Amino acid sequence: MKKTAILGFGNPVRSDDGVGCMVIEDLKKRLGEAEPDISLLDMGTSAFEVLFQLRDHARIILVDGVLNTGEPDGTLYRLPAEAVEASIQDDPMVFLHSLKWDQALSYAKKILGEAYPDDISVYLISITNTRLEVGMSDAVQDAGKKVTDLILEELGMRK
């Protein structure tokens, strides 16, 4: 199996925005610590620190909530490779506690240089509620669980 980094983005105290972090927690429960080729990385509010842990990974899988899609909460998107590559910016504007998936990939590409992997998957979940509160809507939680299943399937590990 390719060494894979799975990154969950979001802020768990901003309601549905925490869905990426929820997927990482769900994967930790389902996979346990027995998978040496899989790194589960919570990108919460310390994303820049985590980006340096991507070295030596051949694959990256990202999960994040996405606002303003016009679709119902919990709608899933899996971006094609062309869309992922087109999202990478040369010098993205970021704030230390609000790094989003496309900005993270932009910085990862700069940090990793030639070691930046070609195999990247991005799962986005439509959200509308980012209020300061703990807990997610049922639709977004269900979508997060579905993404967990899709990732396990993508890795060839149905648990």
Image (cartoon, rainbow, N blue to C red):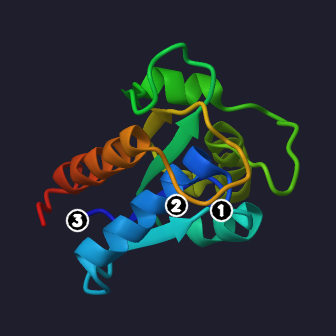
Please identify, in this view, whether the residue under mark 3 or under mark 1 is nearer the observer.
Answer: 1
Q: Which residue is mark 1?
A: 44
123 w.r.t. 54: above or below: above
Q: Which residue is mark 3?
A: 1
Q: Residues within 10 Å of mark 3 (few under 14, many from 20)?
A: few
Q: Nearer the viewer, residue 83 or 17?
A: 17
Left or right of 5: which side holds 51?
right
Mark with earlier residue (2, 1): 2
Which residue position is annotated with label 2?
21
- Say if mark 2 contacts mark 1, CB within 8 Å: yes
Which of the two discs, 3 and 2, labels the residue nearer the N terminus?
A: 3
Q: CA distance from mark 3 to mark 1?
A: 27 Å
Q: Is residue 91 left or right of residue 81?
A: right
Give the amino acid at mark 2.
Cys
Mark 3 or mark 1, earlier in chain: 3
Question: What amino acid type is highlighted by mark number 1?
Answer: Gly
Q: Residue 91 at x, y = what percent?
A: 85, 36
Q: Residue at x 74, y 31 (%)?
A: 89
Residue in the image at 55% along x and 45% along y: 16
Which element is circle 3 on?
A: loop
Residue at the top extreme of this rendering:
70
